[in-house]
Image (cartoon, rainbow, N blue to C red):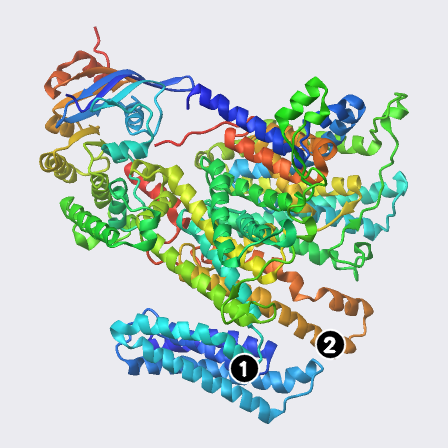
């Protein structure tokens, strides 16, 4: 394409964005005005995005770990996270925890919930790997992907069924499909106010807990993968499965380990999101899964740091879209960003583009 | 297996389905299903074998028919005498049940007999079978009305999805491009129809024109949405198409208050401080509502024909024949496409994109054509759907629809028209016909027979709320996908010539091993 | 007029220069060979000629027409066809269909023609099929294999089918990437004769990458030698065999 044609094309695109953007909330003068009027709300949204992004990043890690090692988009991962939230909710119900319970009464149930959610999700993930993906190891790429979509539907339905078990778990409420309220346990004390900073920006203990847990999990995972023996085996398997096998690594075991870690992270994310949003619903896995996957791709799939970066970016993007564009259009904007990034950088922001060898 | 053995086996497999049908629906359903499945059993019994004479065909066909009929008869007895009282209805009595079942039996044998006979016709066999199938399809709604089974409405739904599955098969089965957002094109077809023939924007064009426009717009959308995905492979392509599948319903949901201003005039106006210079293009007085949001578009114009008049909501016959024509027409077109230069190019791309381009195939053009052709048929389906339901909502076109259509294509057999149609019938019949009916029967059974005998209130509450087959739809879909991938990745009716892309990588590694 | 002229062709992958400023001229009717150690950049060179990789710099000229960076399908239409080092047939298509795909660029039928199936379209399909069967015979596969899936053919037959598929596009220039790889001496000899026959009967120009020196020296009119991405020698087989740099590349430096 000649240079002037390119320029013309860009101009046309800009014109169209200016013309049609406002329909989907992208009204640039209005947005600039809103930001100028209250810069604090911009910072507020960035914070909200950061916290939401941290949760997305934890889920994204599950996608990226699995993709890194067997090049499979584990479609069921989002729904696994939903089951993690349901497990936590069930534990809360079993301990009879109510919103506003004190730290002393809620600490044990919380730890139990964390443990159980991680164990349940890790176990389910390993079982899924063993029975739905492993038999397809040598099948072409479409087969495991479709199998993963199938597992996602199975989990989704499991969530619906679980939500309907009010006879055994009264906390599930009357309607199986309805959102269920998750006990509000984390104090809403504002950290900035407590520190004596005068501002309208809200940043509560809740936000802090989510951020801290997310950072601890991610740093832990990073250290594990970088420095432990098993972590190195994981990286080796991701690089070249055959070579890893020849070097004496039990590849199937490493793959199972990857699913275990990814599942446990999804379980933890489930609990975290329950505590943070105080509501869980069986369909939450689909949207969250898509966003997390988008985040993983955004950062460069297979790349752990990339997943964290992508998660935060997606979180911030959604928060900004909610505030400044239009919350009704946020989903469309998130996917539009995914499409644009994949089209221009198929390897993601930190990933790399591998050319096929002929 | 011997020919006789195969005949028996076909009769028994289909017999089990027929028995389930009779148990759930009762009444004359035995006769109708005996007729339909008897024909199928006759075909299956003679399938893949050389049937030399009509006489041999008759022997095989009627054998399958007899086996099938036994299932129908037994099921009729159980349904009429045991199941009906257990669900709180009055028993049919042994004699009536026997008569109903007996008629089903006879019909099944006759159908098997006739089909078998046609299979032995030698060179005319294909034409005769086609004529028989055509007659069956044409007669079906009439028989259905006579027998009061009320299946025609569901069959129309099945045929709509058949159209969609055929279209998706071009993209996934032929060209090997995994599209997870196919429902988007369905939505685009339906909304195009909605815009052009409803009071929403005061256009009430003729359906016979609109359906072509809808197909054209869908095809165009196929090209537009397909273009950015051209460089992507496999999983990434799947995710981007999924993204489109999510964006399109959001767009239709939210295009309710459009107000467009010309941007250059806006910039000039704000620079010079003259707000009156802004040129307003659309929705100036009040925001323009294009799609009706969550409430959708309603009512949408219906087709009309001389002598028949406008198609009415509860009168299924004209709708049935219309969608039947669309499906047959599409299947015919697609079979032509497959056996052509274009069809070969699609398959070549599926098999090895790089080699295909080195053989002179224009990848961009050929892939876009696959997206466009695939979308065309969903455009037809969307137009028909819009007119048939006379209302469209964004929630109808979500991800699960895309996956259900994909399920059909995979279950039946990627790349095989007969297989895809079969997959569609199985999934849609199970989903729209059998599951709801099963839910009803189970509920009645629970309320009348099981629950009164259970003392534990917790268990009773659990059974009453959680035993609902309709709530297991997704589970069943998911299970179908997983099990099919593991047990029979090539589908129920694999394309004997091209066993889909599912084995390709194996070959590649083999070739590589050899070349070393 | 030479058929193919290549001027200072270069391909860079990141920091790696796979092909470095290579000049090459191919006269009409030649059988020419490209030799060199593994990793010398021969296949990359091929991939640039056939449009699979866009060159970083340099020019490719086919019959006085600059074709640098043109997409593969256009090059096929202009008369360049190739085979692959690790056979890349369409495994789940029949042998006949493979050849028909090879003929893609010589067929006209578009979407409308496909749907309406005019007599001319049917005629074209019939002719194409006949020609494909003919090609099967020509490469020695015979019509018995026509309906076999390509993946079910024996290794030697797959090699032959790939050549038939390439020939179906009626090329002026045929590029063969290690056609005798994995063959025993008998098969190799037969294939060598076959390559000569292709040139004789179809008046083609053939460029091959080959490791088997016997094949190269036996049938080539012209040999180019590559090492580390550069061309280090070219000329008649005899001249190349005598070239000290070539001997060095293959046997290592002689002790002084």
Q: Quadrant of the N terminus of chain B?
A: bottom left
Q: Chain of mark 1?
A: B
Picture layout, residue C247 above or below residue A159: above
Q: On the rendered structure, is A252 left or right of C82?
A: right
Instruction: Report if residue A78 is visible in the image.
Output: no
Mark 1 → mark 2, Cα distance in angstroms:
34 Å
- Please tell me which residue is depicted at 18% across the width and 32% down the height of the picture: C172
| Residue B434 pos. (x, y %) | 59, 70
For the residue pair B44 and A37, the one nearer the viewer reads as A37
| Label 1 vs label 2, nearer the camera | 1
* Identity of the residue furthest to the bottom in this view: B95
| Residue B11 pos. (x, y %) | 44, 77
Q: Chain of mark 2?
A: B
Q: Quadrant of the C terminus of chain B?
A: top left
* Identity of the residue furthest to the left in this view: C200
Q: Secondary structure at mark 1?
A: helix
Picture layout, residue B356 above or below residue A90: above
Numbered mark located on residue B450 in the image: 2
| Residue B287 pos. (x, y %) | 70, 41
- Please tell me which residue is depicted at 64% across the width and 51% down the height of the picture: B200
Numbered mark located on residue A290 in the image: none
User: Which residue position holds label 1?
Assistant: B146
Please tell me in which quadrant of the rendered image residue B152 appears: bottom right
| Residue B136 pos. (x, y %) | 43, 75
Q: On the rendered structure, is B333 left or right of A18?
A: left
Picture layout, residue B489 above or below residue C22: below
Picture layout, residue B100 above or below residue A64: below
């Amino acid at each position: 394409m000649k240079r002037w044609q390119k320029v013309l094309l860009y101009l046309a695109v800009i014109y169209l964005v200016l013309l049609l953007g406002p329909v989907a909330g992208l009204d640039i003068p209005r947005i600039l005005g809103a930001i100028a009027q209250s810069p604090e709300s911009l910072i507020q949204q960035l914070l909200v995005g950061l916290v939401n992004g941290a949760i997305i990043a934890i889920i994204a890690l599950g996608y990226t770990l699995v993709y890194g090692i067997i090049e499979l988009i584990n479609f069921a991962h989002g729904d696994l996270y939903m089951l993690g939230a349901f497990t936590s909710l069930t534990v809360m119900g079993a301990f009879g925890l109510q919103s506003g319970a004190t730290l002393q009464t809620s600490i044990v149930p919380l730890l139990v919930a964390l443990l159980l959610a991680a164990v349940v999700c890790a176990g389910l993930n390993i079982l899924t790997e063993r029975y739905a993906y492993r038999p397809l190891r040598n099948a072409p790429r479409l087969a495991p992907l479709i199998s993963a979509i199938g597992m996602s539907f199975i989990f989704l339905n499991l969530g619906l069924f679980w939500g309907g078990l009010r006879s055994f778990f009264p906390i599930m409420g009357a309607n199986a499909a309805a959102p269920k309220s998750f006990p509000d346990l984390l104090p809403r004390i504002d950290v900035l106010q407590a520190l004596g900073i005068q501002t309208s920006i809200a940043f509560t203990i809740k936000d802090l807990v989510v951020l801290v847990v997310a950072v601890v999990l991610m740093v832990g995972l990073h250290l594990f993968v970088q420095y432990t023996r098993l972590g190195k085996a994981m990286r080796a398997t991701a690089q070249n499965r055959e070579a890893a096998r020849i070097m004496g690594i039990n590849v199937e075991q490493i793959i199972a380990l990857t699913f275990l870690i990814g599942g446990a992270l999804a379980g933890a994310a489930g609990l975290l999101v329950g505590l943070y949003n105080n509501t869980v619903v069986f369909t939450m896995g689909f949207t969250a899964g898509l966003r997390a996957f988008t985040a993983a791709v955004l950062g460069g799939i297979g790349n752990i740091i990339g997943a964290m970066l992508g998660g935060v970016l997606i979180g911030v993007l959604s928060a900004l879209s909610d505030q400044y564009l239009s919350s009704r259009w946020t989903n469309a904007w998130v996917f539009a960003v995914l499409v644009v990034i994949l089209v221009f950088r198929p390897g993601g922001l930190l990933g790399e583009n591998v050319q096929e060898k002929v | 297996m011997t020919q006789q053995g195969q005949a028996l086996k076909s009769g028994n497999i289909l017999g089990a389905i027929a028995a389930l049908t009779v148990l759930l629906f009762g009444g004359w359903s035995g006769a109708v299903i005996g007729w339909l499945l008897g024909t199928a059993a006759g075909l299956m019994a003679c399938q893949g074998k050389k049937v030399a004479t009509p006489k041999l065909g008759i022997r095989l066909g009627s054998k399958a028919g007899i086996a099938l009929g036994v299932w129908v008869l037994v099921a009729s007895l159980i349904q009429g005498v045991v199941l009906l009282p257990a669900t709180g209805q009055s028993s049919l009595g042994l004699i009536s049940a026997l008569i109903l079942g007996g008629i089903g039996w006879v019909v099944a044998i006759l159908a098997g007999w006739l089909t078998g006979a046609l299979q032995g016709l030698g060179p005319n066999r294909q034409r005769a079978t086609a004529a028989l199938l055509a007659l069956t399809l044409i007669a079906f709604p009439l028989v259905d009305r006579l027998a009061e089974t009320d299946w025609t409405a569901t069959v129309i739904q099945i045929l709509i999805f058949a159209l969609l599955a055929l279209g998706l098969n071009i993209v996934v089965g032929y060209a090997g491009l995994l599209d997870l957002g196919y429902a988007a094109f369905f939505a685009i077809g339906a909304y195009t129809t909605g815009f052009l023939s409803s009071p929403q924007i005061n256009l009430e064009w003729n359906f016979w024109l609109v359906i072509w426009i809808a197909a054209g717009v869908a095809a165009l959308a196929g090209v537009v949405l397909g273009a950015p995905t051209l460089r992507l492979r496999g999983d990434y392509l799947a995710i981007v198409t999924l993204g489109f599948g999510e964006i399109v319903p959001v767009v239709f949901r939210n295009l309710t208050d459009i107000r467009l201003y010309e941007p250059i005039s806006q910039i000039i106006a704000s620079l010079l401080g003259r707000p009156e210079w802004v040129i307003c293009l659309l929705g100036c007085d009040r925001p323009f509502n294009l799609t009706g949001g969550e409430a959708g578009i309603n009512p949408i114009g219906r087709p009309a024909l001389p002598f028949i008049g406008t198609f009415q909501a509860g009168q299924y016959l004209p709708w049935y024949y219309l969608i039947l024509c669309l499906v047959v027409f599409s299947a015919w077109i697609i079979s032509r496409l497959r056996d052509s230069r274009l069809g070969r190019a699609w398959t070549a791309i599926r098999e090895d994109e790089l080699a295909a381009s080195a053989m002179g195939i224009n990848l961009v053009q050929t892939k876009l054509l696959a997206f466009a052709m695939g979308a065309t048929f969903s455009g037809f389906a969307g137009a028909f759907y819009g007119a048939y339901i006379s209302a469209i909502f964004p929630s109808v076109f979500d991800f699960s629809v895309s996956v259900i259509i994909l399920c059909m294509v995979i279950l039946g057999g990627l790349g095989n028209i007969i297989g895809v149609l079969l997959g569609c019938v199985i999934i849609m019949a199970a989903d729209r016909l059998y599951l709801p009916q099963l839910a009803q029967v189970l509920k009645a059974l629970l309320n009348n027979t099981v629950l009164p005998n259970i003392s534990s209130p917790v268990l009773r509450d659990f059974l009453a709320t959680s035993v609902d087959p309709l709530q297991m739809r997704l589970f069943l879909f998911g299970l179908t996908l997983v099990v099919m991938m593991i047990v029979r990745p090539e589908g129920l009716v694999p394309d004997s010539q091209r066993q889909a892309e599912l084995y390709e990588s194996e070959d590649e590694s083999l070739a590589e091993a050899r070349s070393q | 007029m030479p058929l193919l002229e290549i001027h200072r062709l270069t391909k860079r992958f990141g920091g790696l220069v796979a092909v470095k400023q290579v000049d090459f001229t191919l006269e009409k009717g030649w059988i020419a060979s490209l030799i060199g150690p593994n990793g010398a950049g021969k296949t990359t060179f091929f991939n640039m000629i056939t449009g699979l990789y866009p060159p970083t710099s340099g020019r490719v000229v086919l019959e006085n027409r600059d074709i640098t960076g043109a997409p593969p399908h256009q090059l096929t239409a202009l008369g360049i066809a190739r085979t692959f080092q690790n056979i890349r047939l369409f495994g789940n298509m029949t042998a006949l269909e493979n050849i028909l795909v090879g003929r893609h660029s010589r067929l006209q039928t578009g979407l409308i023609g496909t749907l309406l199936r005019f007599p001319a379209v049917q005629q074209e399909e019939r002719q194409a099929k006949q020609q494909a069967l003919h090609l099967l015979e020509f490469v020695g596969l015979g019509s018995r294999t026509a309906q076999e899936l390509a993946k079910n053919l024996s290794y030697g037959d797959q090699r032959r089918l790939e050549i038939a598929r390439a020939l179906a596009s009626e090329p002026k220039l045929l590029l063969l990437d290690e056609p005798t790889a994995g063959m025993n001496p008998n098969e190799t000899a037969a294939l060598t004769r076959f390559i000569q026959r292709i040139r004789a009967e179809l008046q083609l120009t053939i460029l091959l990458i080959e490791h088997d020196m016997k094949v190269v020296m036996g049938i080539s009119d012209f040999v180019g030698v590559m090492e580390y991405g550069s061309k280090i020698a070219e000329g008649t087989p005899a001249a190349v065999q005598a070239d000290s740099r070539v001997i060095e590349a293959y046997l290592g430096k002689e002790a002084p």
